[in-house]
Image (spheres, grey):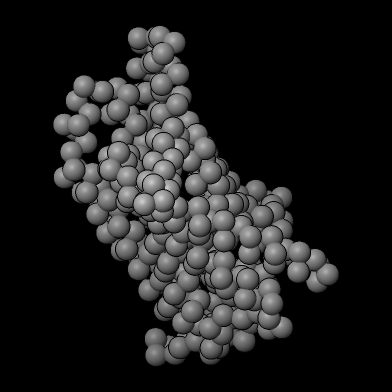
């Protein structure tokens, strides 16, 4: 194929979820409820952090960005999935597919980097409590957030441009509920070695290095606790880190199991189920994990409601 040749097709067909036709309505209602829960839950966290001055701290700066990332990450795939579940021809345009790839990578990477920033914040809070405000200065916190957004922008753009140079023939059926890059590479009639190398090296770095940094942060936290053991210190550490560890386990467990440790026995249905875990379930559970396990968030919710109640009666 010459460099001037472009894709022959104008759209892709998404096979969606592997469910029976008589179960479509039930799964549609389920996923619609999950998506609405994700949107409302993450919006609530963002609004609470914005309104309550007690939450204007580094930890909640990262959490508000994480909630925004979760909201957008779920919105990249869920609306199209819900639309296709009610459509006779579940398709996505070529431009829409590239757009979905870009924002899927962008918000997925952003969540990974923000989880690292939150792990570092917990490490400083527990291991250097007296120097916390000095180390986690507003300048450093803002820098961590900005760097996360910039790096994810370039990484997502790189993969999207590499995918855009591929050519596709008549086979345009994607056996997934969104435009998964690995599925697109299998459909392409172009040489995909460059794409595969970039995914293996740069994609691996984007996932592995943040994960190792998180593990290192919590290893240092555990070492610090064991060095000066006390019942109160252990309880405080678990209270501070429990929510974050839950989110890390959910997100990285699914991503690593699907992309970095693939099994030859993995069926397509199993891969789709794991993709649903980190694209749909994790963004929905994060607000519950952070709100139900976090006394500060509960206190902020009570203060906001009490304040609004007083204003209502006035």
Q: Nearer the viewer, residue 78 or 278?
A: 78
Above or below for 248 versus 225: below
Query: Horizontal and vertical percent for residue 172?
Result: 61, 81
Disc tally is 0
Q: Is residue 188 left or right of residue 171?
A: left
Which of the 4 image quadrants contains residue 120? top left
Query: Horizontal and vertical percent for residue 61?
Result: 30, 46
Above or below for 96 versus 221: below
Q: Residue at left 40%, top 9%?
A: 230
Query: Horizontal and vertical percent for residue 5?
Result: 44, 90
Q: Residue at left 34%, top 17%?
A: 224
Q: Is residue 294 left or right of residue 13?
A: left
Residue situated furthest front in the rendering: 314
Q: Is residue 204 left or right of residue 57?
A: right
- Residue 233 seen: yes
- Residue 213 seen: no
Q: Nearer the viewer, residue 181 or 234?
A: 234
Which of the 4 image quadrants contains residue 99? bottom left
Above or below for 97 versus 18: below
Query: Horizontal and vertical percent for residue 170?
Result: 62, 86
Above or below for 268 versus 229: below
Q: Residue at left 39%, top 90%?
A: 4
Q: Residue at left 70%, top 67%?
A: 28
Q: Is residue 281 left or right of residue 223?
A: right
Q: Nearer the viewer, residue 203 or 238?
A: 238
């Amino acid at each position: 194929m010459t460099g001037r040749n472009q894709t022959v097709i104008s759209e892709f067909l998404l096979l969606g979820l592997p469910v029976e036709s008589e179960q479509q309505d039930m799964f549609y209602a389920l996923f619609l409820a999950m998506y609405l829960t994700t949107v409302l839950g993450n919006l609530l966290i963002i609004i609470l952090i914005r309104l309550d001055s007690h939450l204007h701290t580094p930890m909640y700066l990262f959490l508000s960005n994480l909630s925004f990332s979760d909201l957008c990450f779920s919105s990249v795939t869920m609306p199209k999935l819900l639309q296709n579940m009610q459509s006779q021809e579940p398709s996505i345009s070529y431009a829409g597919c590239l757009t979905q790839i870009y924002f899927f990578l962008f918000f997925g990477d952003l969540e990974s980097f923000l989880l690292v920033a939150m792990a570092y914040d917990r490490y400083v809070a527990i291991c250097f409590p007296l120097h916390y405000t000095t180390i986690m200065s507003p300048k450093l916190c803002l820098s961590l957030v900005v760097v996360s957004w910039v790096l994810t922008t370039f990484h997502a753009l790189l993969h999207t441009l590499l995918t855009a140079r591929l050519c596709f023939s008549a086979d345009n059926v994607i056996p997934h509920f969104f435009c998964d890059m690995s599925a697109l590479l299998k459909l392409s009639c172009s040489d995909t070695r460059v794409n595969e190398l970039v995914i293996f090296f740069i994609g691996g770095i984007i996932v592995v290095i943040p994960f190792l940094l998180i593990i290192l942060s919590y290893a240092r936290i555990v070492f610090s606790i064991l060095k000066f053991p006390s019942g109160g210190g252990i309880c405080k550490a678990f209270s501070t880190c429990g929510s974050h560890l839950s989110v890390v386990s959910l997100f990285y467990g699914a991503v690593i199991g699907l992309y970095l440790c693939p099994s030859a026995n993995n069926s397509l249905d199993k891969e789709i189920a794991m993709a649903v875990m980190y694209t749909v379930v994790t963004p929905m559970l994060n607000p519950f994990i952070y709100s139900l396990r976090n006394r500060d968030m509960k206190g902020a919710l009570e203060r906001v409601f009490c304040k609004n109640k007083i204003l209502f009666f006035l």
